[in-house]
Image (tube, helix red, strand yellow):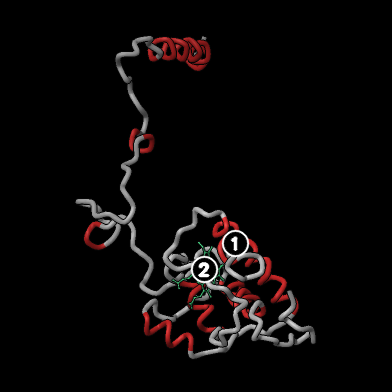
Amino acid sequence: MKPIEIAKYLAPVLLAVIVMVTCKRDYSKPGREYAPDMAHSKAYETYTKVKDNTAFEDGYTALEPAKGSIARGQKVYHGDDTPEGYTLATASDENPLALTDEALARGKEVYSIYCTPCHGPKGDGEGTAVLGSNYNLAAPPINFTAPTGEWTSGRIFHVINYGKGNMGAYASQIAYDDRWRLVHYVKSLNNANTATTADGSQTASK
Ligand code: HEC
């Protein structure tokens, strides 16, 4: 027998021996691990400092986005969430989106999802949350239908973004352009506003 042939017969035997020797049924011992670093990688908390971590300066595990950065395709409202910002916003009645039937239809859709519980389907402030009697807020929701004449687009948009009094902010729930469509719709609820859409239909219809 040539040595190579002996090896051919011996190899499976050797393998079987290795398997039998390594598979010990002693669960009290962890045994040997191959490349343990891969199985048990060091877990770092994101955005924290870790000693000896060289990934970033000062040992930080991740860097925050640069100040002022926004997600791709997103738009940001730059008005300040202050009384001054509110006054400034109120002074403008401009809506960057054209008043069209589609814009109003989408505005209505968004309104019915987020605003009706308090402001009511008609915008008169008689939503189910209010009529449900447990609603005991210092300031009730605004009645959009009352012709106060101060419902500028800028003001409505500002309030949708930041909220006011007992009303929460909706900037994170409603997409930027949908917020402007919502402004068109809220304005259309006001009896003092009888605008005509670019498509020629009246908006103050209820
Ligand atoms: C939880 C109930 C609630 C919901 C939901 C709600 N509002 Fe309001 N809203 C209020 C209350 C209360 C006020 C009065 C705030 C104040 O002046 O203190 C108000 C006021 C407003 C005003 C007038 C702010 C001003 O300038 O005086 C606008 C505009 C408005 N809401 C729009 C909306 C729109 C649009 C939605 C839907 C995205 C919405 N609200 C959802 C409760 C709500």
Q: How many badges with numbers are in the image? A: 2
Q: Residue, x 62% and y 61% (percent of image)?
A: 113
Indicate yes or no: mark 2 CB to ligand 1 under 8 Å: yes
The residue most toward the right is 200
Q: Tag 1, which secondary structure?
A: loop
- Kindly identify the amino acid type of the residue bearing the numbered disc 1: Gly
**Horizontal side of residue 174 vs 106, given as left or right:** left
Give the residue pinned by disc 1.
Answer: 127
The answer to whether marks 1 and 2 mark residues whose Cβ atoms lie closer than 8 Å is yes
Q: Residue, x 45% and y 59% (percent of image)?
A: 136
Q: Is residue 3 above or below residue 132?
A: above
Give the residue pinned by disc 2.
Answer: 141
Image coords of residue 152 (percent x, y): 55, 85
Quarter of the image where one finds residue 105 = bottom right
Mark 1, Cα crowd under 10 Å, few <14 / some 14-19 / many 20+, is: some
**First in sequence: mark 1 vs mark 2:** 1
Q: Residue, x 60% and y 83% (percent of image)?
A: 147
Question: If the image is split into quadrants, where does the C terminus sit?
Answer: bottom right
Q: Is residue 185 above or below residue 9?
A: below
